[in-house]
């Protein structure tokens, strides 16, 4: 039996109770779940019979989960195999739209599907595609220049050893086609950390996933188009898992909720042009109890804003 199937019930939707508490005053409307995954958020929202959910996910493997949820919630659930940056192209017209929700983490099924190559335990051809991609990790590692690899690792992974790792990859790929386990070994040889809670390859894998799936531009466009389709009083909720994502979301909400902009490169907003009301300026993070139950939630941060203009 596939490990993904065996462990499916052990997936824990991150910050679910906090999310429910935040959006529950809006119940009785339609919610967009931009990252369906294993359906944790959607299933919880649909427990209230007056709610409807429109769900998106770029991963075609999610379709089976979506069909099951749709079958159990007749006329209250619709699914699109689409990237959330394309939310504006779906022509979603719902006068009762209440919130757009983003969970930017990977589902347990995706991590344990070793064909996707998102895990350090994967073997074989480098992939890391989440769906609807233009290129794979193998294309990047095999063809991109040493200088570009260094930039990817440094910017998207915030990796201190980016230059050395990029050089070692190019040296090794000239001898043999690199597989996932080869990349893990290259990083491990350079970063000889004996006492660390995280795998030495964490930042390198993060950088490659971000680059291959265009996660930064996806997030920025997703936020922009979500704002455009939301009515006044609607809410955008985002759960991030690393600092780059969180900085973007923080800037987006902070910059368009204050009279004095957080960026000196943008004109100051007048009160009439403020776009969001923030109930909490600081992010909501998992409790120690949730982290104990679900260690992968430890880096999660939830931010949200209410559209006022």
Image (cartoon, rainbow, N blue to C red):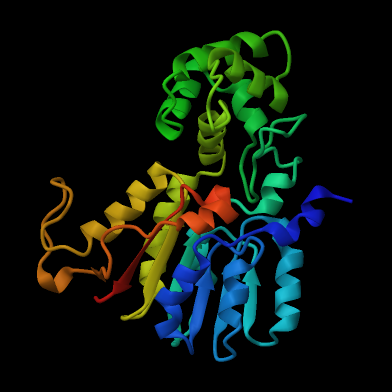
Q: Which quadrant of the view contains residue 26?
A: bottom left
| Residue ID at (44%, 46%) | 216
Q: Position of residue 75 (x, y in %)?
A: 66, 87
Q: Position of residue 104 (x, y in %)?
A: 51, 54
Q: Is residue 179 visible?
A: no
45 or 288, nearer to the observer: 288
84 or 260, nearer to the observer: 260
Q: How many marks?
A: 0
| Residue ID at (24%, 58%) | 254
Quarter holding the C terminus is bottom left
- Specify whether 17 is left or right of 224: right
Q: Residue reaching furthest right?
A: 1
| Residue ID at (76%, 54%) | 7
- 298 is higher (above) or lower (below) than 57: above
Q: Is residue 142 visible?
A: yes
- 151 is higher (above) or lower (below) than 296: above
- Specify whether 109 is left or right of 288: right
Q: Position of residue 157 (x, y in %)?
A: 46, 32
Q: Position of residue 156 (x, y in %)?
A: 44, 34
| Residue ID at (37%, 60%) | 284
Q: Which quadrant of the view contains residue 22?
A: bottom left
């Amino acid at each position: 039996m596939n490990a993904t199937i065996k462990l499916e019930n052990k997936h824990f939707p991150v910050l679910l109770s906090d999310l429910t508490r935040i959006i529950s005053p809006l119940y009785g409307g339609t919610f967009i779940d931009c990252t369906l995954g294993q359906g944790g958020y959607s299933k919880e929202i649909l427990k209230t019979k007056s709610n409807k959910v429109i769900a998106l996910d770029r991963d075609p493997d999610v379709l089976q989960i979506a069909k099951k949820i749709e079958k159990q919630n007749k006329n209250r659930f619709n699914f699109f195999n689409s990237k959330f940056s394309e939310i504006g192209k779906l022509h979603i017209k719902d006068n009762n739209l209440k919130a757009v929700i983003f969970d930017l983490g990977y589902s347990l099924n995706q991590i344990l599907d070793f064909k996707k190559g998102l895990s350090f335990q994967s073997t074989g051809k480098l992939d890391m595609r989440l769906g609807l991609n233009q290129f794979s990790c193998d294309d990047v590692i095999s063809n991109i220049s040493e200088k570009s690899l260094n930039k990817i690792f440094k910017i998207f992974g915030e990796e201190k050893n980016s230059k050395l790792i990029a050089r070692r990859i190019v040296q090794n790929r000239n001898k043999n086609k690199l597989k996932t386990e080869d990349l893990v070994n290259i990083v491990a040889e350079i970063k000889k950390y004996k006492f660390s809670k995280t795998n030495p390859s964490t930042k390198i894998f993060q950088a490659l996933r971000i680059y291959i799936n265009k996660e930064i531009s996806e997030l920025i466009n997703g936020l922009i188009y979500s704002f455009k389709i939301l009515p006044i009083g609607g809410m955008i909720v985002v759960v991030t898992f690393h600092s780059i994502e969180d900085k973007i979301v923080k800037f987006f909400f902070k910059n368009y909720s204050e009279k004095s902009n957080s960026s000196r490169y943008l004109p100051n907003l007048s009160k009439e042009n403020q776009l969001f009301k923030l109930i909490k300026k600081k992010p909501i993070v998992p409790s120690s109890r949730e982290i104990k139950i679900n260690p992968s939630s430890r880096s999660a941060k939830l931010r949200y804003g209410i559209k006022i203009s």
